[in-house]
Amino acid sequence: MGIRTERNGNELIVEPVGEINILTAPELERTLSGATDGIELLTMDFKECDYVSSAGLRVLLATYKILKNNKAKMRFINVGENFSEVLENTGLDAVFDIE
């Protein structure tokens, strides 16, 4: 997995490439842990991410909670059908802002 990041003012755009699984989730966690300081919006762009495991969901949910405590927002864009189904089945579609 690779991760592209772009900062645009108070917005951070993160684009995971490939799969977020038990092996790659720690890389995403490291990327997000330092990069979210001082932002108002985190946009997760999943256009090139084919799979998100429960380990990946844990990282995304932990990041969401940190941002919420800092009064920042998190949104998902370009969510594929498989990932969308996982979010619906886990009830996380009601937690995350999915566009």
Image (cartoon, helix red, strand yellow):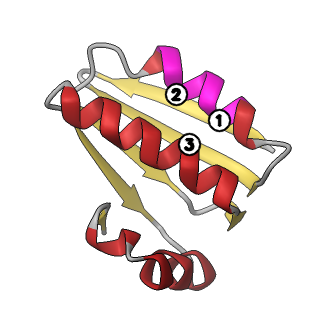
Q: CA distance from mark 2 to mark 1?
A: 6 Å
* Labelled pair 2, 3 in contact (Cβ < 8 Å): yes
Relative height, residue 58 to residue 13 (above, below) = below
The image quadrant of residue 92 is bottom left
The residue under label 3 is which amino acid type?
Val
The image quadrant of residue 63 is top left
The residue located at (52%, 27%) in the rendering is 32
The residue located at (49%, 47%) in the rendering is 60
The residue located at (45%, 39%) in the rendering is 62
The residue identified by callout 1 is: 28
Q: CA distance from mark 2 to mark 3?
A: 9 Å
Q: Would you say residue 30 sits in the magenta stretch?
A: yes
- Labelled disc at residue 59: 3
The image quadrant of residue 97 is bottom left
Q: Would you say residue 76 sits in the magenta stretch?
A: no
* Labelled pair 1, 3 in contact (Cβ < 8 Å): yes
In the displayed structure image, the side of residue 48 where residue 47 appears, left or right? left
Q: Position of residue 3 (x, y in %)?
A: 68, 37
The residue identified by callout 2 is: 32
Task: List the single residue furthest toward the right.
Answer: 23
- Judged by its main secondary structure, the magenta piece is helix
Residues rendered magenta in the picture? 27-34
Judging depth in this view, the residue of 98 and 48 nearest the camera is 98
Q: Position of residue 71 (x, y in %)?
A: 13, 30
In the displayed structure image, the side of residue 70 where residue 56 appears, left or right? right
